[in-house]
Amino acid sequence: MITDKLRRPLGSLRVSVTDRCNLRCRYCMPEQDYVWLPKQSILTFEEIARLVSVFTSWGVEKIRLTGGEPLLRHDLPTLTAMLAANTAVRDLALTTNGVLLARHAAPLKQAGLGRVTVSLDTLRADRMRELARTDRHADVLEGIRTARAAGFSLKLNTVVIRGVNDDELGDLIEFARKHKAEVRFIEYMDVGGATAWSAEQVVSQREMLEVLSARYGAITPVTAGDISAPAERFRLPDGTTFGIVASTTAPFCRSCDRSRLTADGTWFLCLYAARGTDLREPLRKGATDAELADLIAATWRGRTDRGAEERLALVNRAPLFPVEGLRADPHREMHTRGG
Ligand code: SAM
Ligand code: SF4
Ligand code: SF4
C-alpha cells in the first residue's frame, strides 16, 4: 500500500475508456462542439489491463469503468473480462448513462462485471430531452430493468439542479425502490466542463434532506462502512436507503482514495487537478512494470490535492475553466476525466 502526503491510500481507480458521449448533459457537456482526444492516443485494452495490473500491485482494489459513455467503446465485455481476470480487483464497476445498457448488460455480467451505476436525472422523457438533448429516456429505463434482470446490484446517480429536477427527489427514491436500486443524489459540481454552473443552481445536501424529511418523516444517517466512499447514506423511516454526494457543499477530500485514468493514459490525482501524469508515453516507450510502478508510487506519494475543499473556500465561485481553456486542453473536461 502507498499513501499520499495526507496519508490517504491509493485505493480506487476510475478508468475512462472513451471521451466520447452520446448525450449532452447540460451540467457536463453543454457546448455545441468539442475537441476530442486523438484516436491514436487512446489506450488499447491490453494497455489498460497492464496499467491496471501495475495499480493493483500497489493495492488498488476498486476499478470503475467510465467515460464519456463507456458503452460507446467497442467490445467492452472483452476489457471487462481482462480486468475481472486480475484477482486483485475486488470491486469491478461501471458508470453509464444507460442508453445502450439493455444490449450490453448480460454480456457484461458474463464477463465478470460486478456492479453498475446508471445516471438517471429525471423520470420524465420531456425533461431529459431538455437536460441531455436526447430522446432515449425509454432506453435508459429499459437498460435499468435489463441490468437488474441480469443480476446486477444497481445504483442510480442523479445530479440535482435547482429549477430543473429538484422536484423529483422523492419520485426518484420511489423509482429506485421499485427497481431494487439505490439512488445517490449528487450536488451539482463546478468541475471542468460544467460551463453553465452557478452557485444558485446547487441544491445542498442539507436542503435535499429537508425536502425529503417533509415527505417521509425523520431521516437517519446510516453508519459509514467505507469511509472513503463519496456518498453519505441515509435511511427513511420505512428502511429505504439512499445516498447524497455532497461534493460541492461538504466535500470529503480528507478520505479520498480515488484517482482517474483518462482514455489516453493520463493519470489525474483529483477531479479538479490542473494537470495529470502521462503514463502512456512511458508505457509505449517500453517501460517495465517496475518502472511504471515507481512512477505511480512517486506521483501518489507527492499528492496533496484537496480540490473540492479548496473550491469551497473561494468567495466568488464560478466555473473552473472558461470554454477556451477547455478547448486548449480537453483533459480538463469532466467527460474526459470520467466523473
Ligand atoms: N457517461 C456516464 C454517465 O453519465 O454515467 C459516465 C461518465 S459521467 C462523467 C460520470 C458521472 O459524472 C455521472 O454520474 C454524471 O452525472 C456525473 N457528473 C458529470 N458532470 C457533473 C457535474 N457538473 N456535477 C456533478 N456530477 C457530474
Ligand atoms: Fe452526461 Fe455522462 Fe455524457 Fe457527461 S459523460 S454528458 S454526464 S452522459
Ligand atoms: Fe478527491 Fe479531489 Fe474529489 Fe477532493 S476534489 S474528493 S481530493 S477527487
Image (cartoon, rainbow, N blue to C red):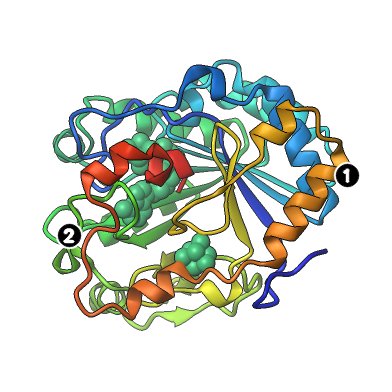
In the rendered structure, the answer to whether residue 35 lies left or right of residue 222 reads left
Q: Whole-percent x and y of residue 185? A: 36, 60
Which dot, 2 or 1, sits closer to the camera? 1
Disc 2 designates what residue? 167
In this rendering, the answer to whether 90 lies above or below 78 is below
Q: Whole-percent x and y of residue 338? A: 48, 43
Quadrant position of the N terminus in the picture: bottom right
In the rendered structure, the answer to whether residue 25 lies left or right of residue 200 reads right
Residue 301: tell me if it is visible: yes
In this rendering, the answer to whether 172 lies above or below 313 is above
Q: Whole-percent x and y of residue 95? A: 50, 41
Q: What residue do we see at 55% from left, 17% from top? A: 40
In the rendered structure, the answer to whether residue 15 lies left or right of residue 48 reads left
Q: What residue do we see at 34% from left, 56% from top? A: 191
Q: Whole-percent x and y of residue 104? A: 54, 22
Numbered tag placed on residue 50 in the rendering: none
**Which picture quadrant has residue 20?**
top left
Disc 1 designates what residue? 290
Instruction: Look at label 1 and name its amino acid.
Output: Ala
State the residue in front, 136 or 215: 136
| Residues packed near mark 1 inside 10 Å, few (<14), some (14 to 19) or many (20 plus) | few
Q: Are marks 2 and 1 in contact (CB under 8 Å)?
A: no
**Is disc 2 placed on a helix, strand or loop?**
loop
In this rendering, the answer to whether 302 lies above or below 218 is above
Instruction: Look at label 2 and name its amino acid.
Output: Asp
Q: What residue do we see at 60% from left, 16% from top? A: 75
Give the alpha-carbon distance from disc 2 to disc 1, as whole Å: 52 Å
